[in-house]
Amino acid sequence: MTAKRKPEGTGRRFVKVCHILDQHNRNPARLVPILQAVQEEYRYLPQEVLTYVATALGVSPARVYGVATFYAHFTILPKGKHLVRLCDGTACHVKESVPILRALQKRLGVDEQKRLGVDDRRKTTEDMLFTVETVACLGACGLAPVVVIDDQVYGQQSPESAVKLVEALITQEAQ
Amino acid sequence: MSAQSLPHPNGNNGHTAQRRVIVCAGTGCVASGAYKVFQALVDQVRAAGLPVITEFRPEHEADAVRLNKSGCQGFCQMGPLVTVLPENLLYNKVRVEDVAAIVAETLVAGRLVERLLYVDSTTKKRCRGVEEIPFYQRQQRFVLRSCGTIDPESIDEYVHQGGYAAAKKAYVQMTPEQICQEITRSGLRGRGGGGFPTGRKWEAARSQPEGKKYVICNADEGDPGAFMNRSVMEGNPHSVLEGLMIAARAIGADETLIYVRTEYPLAVQRMRSAVKDAEARGFLGDNAFGTGRPLRCEVMEGAGAFVCGEETAMIASIEGQRGMPRPKPPFPAQSGLWGKPTIINNVETLAHAVRIVNEGAEQFRTLGTAASPGTKTFALTGHVANTGLVEVPFGATLREVVFDIGGGITDRRGKVTRDGFKAVQIGGPSGGCLTRDHLDLPLDYDSLRGAGAMVGSGGLVAMNSKTCMVSSARFFMDFTQRESCGKCVLCREGTRQMLALLDDIIEGRATAGTLELLQKLASAVQKGSLCGLGKTAPNPVLSTLRHFREEYDAHVFHKHCPTGQCKALAKPSIDPAKCKGCTACAKKCPVNAITGERKQAHTINQALCIKCGVCVDTCKLDAVIGV
């Protein structure tokens, strides 16, 4: 398991993945941290990388795919340049986070999240600039309702103020 | 009122009271701009000619100002918070523009900056500091004692305050049996939700044959609306690590792991740096406290699955699998991580263990009730005036927490209302709701269980009279349905069907049979699920059905939502007395359901109306009613 073997021909393409795998001693038990590091690098988990990770760890691609799709943090689809996360934890929910979500979705033209069979593709704008997601709780409940854009937390938001934040980014991108 | 002079910090009591300014750097205050305030303080104190110290020193020059960032001080809504010692002033909602006044007035001239003080919403009195603010006054901070003053990134300061003495005592002076006995005598119960006696858990793992054993700190605080663990990890990470070391000694483990929620990046960073500093000091490593025993600690980030807060699911996740639970027994204390004896304790439980070892079980038992000794932190959120992190002894009543500490219930606009209280949801998606009848119920493990709720991890969400309880039950059902891991059919499919039934109720399709079916299904899900997530998933529905049956009945039989929150049941109409016939609503209506002559009262055709609410937003005269 600790041997640093390099599958021929693919080594160069996946240099970064190899480095991540080596950091974790190519230990299948480290699958979750490995996928986290890969996602940090690529911003999502491309299918060919998942297969590569499976081969390198000596486990089935199904096992890797199973883990990648189980956890909410992992995404197998590319996300937009700006990640807009709306907290829909209990505290934010009772302080009316849903109208904020609707306003953001409307402004950015991403579909409303369907309850059943959520299609991740619809959370991202066509120009790949924005992805709108909800998260269960960010632990900033004292500031509810909370919107997080690219890791910057904005507290006590309203539909209007949240849309303004996004519009500022749109203006910035247009320049 | 003119600025009040403060006694000189180096008063005449002979001690050199050290000047210190603490900026709260918890997630809440950082979001409100705490880092900028801190930097402005550093720059402007320097510019004022005062020596600035930003790292911990046991003693420093009398005229120097020590500036440090702290973890969450709990009063998140009023952030960024700036505490000035030794006077113990608390300035709230401090912006960069206010820094000049703090430096010139308070630090240089020794006067108060009145406008930055907290104003009590009931007495309208300006409060100088934590001693005068009811939010803090009524609390008893045990676990959170140092959170908010100590620099979370300084192991030196933690050690200077007596830190790691308990871990050292556990390693050098005490045997594992003695530690387990002390914890058992203290009556400490797991703070993560279940309330299982910690001492018994440790003893079960200790009594297993010697060999590889593990201790895991459960910091996967997934309950939406709860942030107690985050605050402790961000505010005093070394206390968590020290508790973990004591647990390891108690059961004879040499490897420990902290499983932190990935949504808490600051907590992850602080825990990692605490582990690194403890290694550098020789508290962790091959020779813990010079005893020759190895002790290691790793911080692992979760990947966003609520079910991983369950012990066996967390173990699966650490082993690199999908986080699915497995049947118990065998309990993790017998066969856990990699099949070895493992104990999993909540962050708060471990932080309590430190003080129990330090001060003894009797001291711990002086707080709380006989069956639930000690204190508990609660994350108080929702419709209360003061949201934030609070710590009270077990046995405090709901009234004390919501009204005395929380400052009362607020309406939609954030104003305190007298009769606004409707319910609190305690214990998150696994818990239940408490009503007006429970206001004097003591908050402890057993009374809450009797009331059909649970302490849970400590999330307390207050709801005002404008909150629809059916929608609130639906919110939790939606959460558990999404977070169900899918292993047990009744949890996976049952929660989905329960959600569909709740949607029927909310959207006006329900019949008398719906409620009966909902109740039947709820009890089936409880019985047919393996882990805590499934077993408790129906709780919010069952407890709202028990306490707010009339609200369900109104939805089902009268197709009416008493709070007006369920849009599908709304029957918008136009008040002819108010309508001036401006035609604005008719122009905006997307389905042309509004008709009427100019300057005549308009009407809404119910058959066409899609209840989008555009007319309500458009009307400047508030003539649209019934929504």
Image (cartoon, coloured by chain):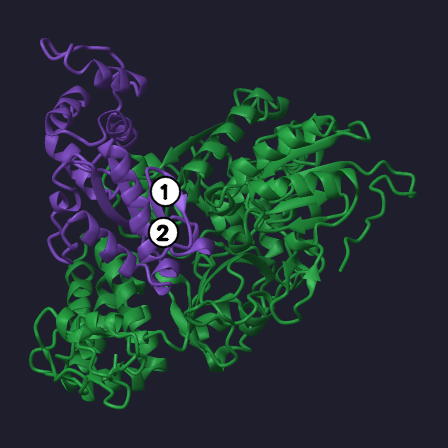
Chain colours: A purple, B green
Q: Position of residue B331 (x, y in %)?
A: 36, 49
B550 vs B197, left or right, is: left
In percent of the image, x 32 and y 64: which residue is there?
B536
Apparent side of residue B397 relative to residue A12 in the rendered image (left or right): right
* Residue matched to label 1: B263
Classify mark 1: residues with Cα within 10 Å, few (<14), some (14-19) or many (20+): many
Residue B61 or residue B532, whichever sits in front:
B61
| Mark 1 secondary-structure assignment | loop
In the rendered structure, the residue with mark 2 lies on which chain?
A
Residue B374 x, y percent position in the rendering: 61, 58
Local SS, label 2: loop
Seen at 37% across and 76% down, the residue is B466
> What mark, if any, has residue B607 been given in the picture?
none
Q: Quadrant of the N terminus of chain B?
A: bottom right
Regarding residue B240, the answer to whether it shows in the image is no
In the picture of the structure, the residue carrying the numbered disc 2 is A137
The residue drawn where x is 45% and y is 75% is: B450
Using the image, determine if residue B423 lies above or below residue B61: below
The chain to which mark 1 is attached is B
Q: Position of residue A152 (x, y in %)?
A: 38, 40
Query: Which residue is drawn at the image coordinates 25% and 79% (left, top)?
Result: B627
Check the image and name the residue furthest to the bottom: B577
Residue type highlighted by circle 1 = Glu
Between the residue at mark 1 and the residue at mark 2, the CA separation in whole angstroms equals 8 Å
Q: Is residue B491 above or below residue B217?
A: below
Residue B220: % across, % down? 39, 45
